[in-house]
Amino acid sequence: MHSILNSWLIEGLEAAYFNLFFMVWNTFLAVIPFVLSLWLFRGHGAHARTFVWWIGFFTFVAFLPNAPYVLTDIIHLVHDIRQGQSIWAISIILVPQYFLFMLIGFEAYVAALINFNRYLSRAGQKRWVCPSELLLHGLTAIGIYLGRFLRFNSWDIVTRPDTLVIETVERVLHKQPLAIIFATFCIITVLYWLMKQLTLALLLYWRTRRLRTVRRY
């Protein structure tokens, strides 16, 4: 029994190791919009909307779908399960690995939009926070569909704009793709709202605790 359990765990570790290749790459892509949000909306770039700022903002919007895109990588976990992985390997190794991977990616999306929202609020445009969130959720849902089903990348906007436009018009504007995009939009909107409340609550707790610590000294 002990040898069988070891064999199962080793198989799970091997599967987790092979998952690291696409997880590291997709996590890198997911973090890009968050890093850009720090410069665009909180750093020196937030003080002036220069031509470089607009290029950065366009890049931010183009790469934003990569963050919640990690949620669709759950299909790889389904594949691992279908490969015959043991329940021990799945529950102890693979599920925690995928959970952490998707949590990091989606939290990068939430944090990036929180930075954008604060930027709008400081600029006196708080009324546009909710419409902007919904617009970005919609664009993100479209981007996820283009990436998952049509296999486009964010940089194809620059490298293959003609192909991207043609494929979008010919293959996306139909009932099934639109239904998938709408469902994705709803999922992102709900998960974003939940994670946003949790993130803001944690930030408030951390700041309050830090303030109390400072006052002690």
Image: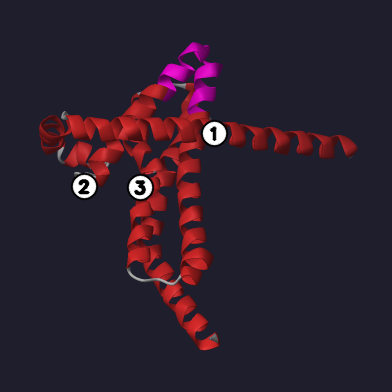
Inspect the image, locate mark 3, and give the three-letter code of the amino acid beneath it: Thr
Residue at (48, 70) in percent of width and height = 89
Inspect the image, locate mark 1, and give the three-letter code of the amino acid beneath it: Leu
Badge nearest the viewer, 3 or 2: 3
Say which mark, if any, is on residue 173.
none
Where, quadrant-wise, is the C terminus in this rendering? top right
Say which mark, if any, is on residue 72.
3
- Using a 10 Å C-alpha cutoff, classify the residue at mark 3 as few (fewer than 14 neighbours), some (14 to 19) or many (20 or more): few
Residue at (66, 38) in percent of width and height = 202
In magenta, the rendered stretch is 115-133
Residue at (20, 37) in percent of width and height = 158
Residue annotated with mark 2: 151
Find the distance from the CA under tag 1 to the CA under tag 2: 29 Å
127 or 214: which is nearer to us? Answer: 127
Q: In the image, residue 118 lies at what x, y percent?
A: 54, 24
Residue at (23, 40) in percent of width and height = 146
First reached walking from the N terminus: tag 3 or tag 2: 3
Inspect the image, locate mark 2, and give the three-letter code of the amino acid beneath it: Arg
The answer to whether the residues at label 1 and label 2 have Cβ atoms under 8 Å apart is no
Left of 160 or right of it: where is 101?
right
Find the distance from the CA under tag 3 to the CA under tag 2: 13 Å
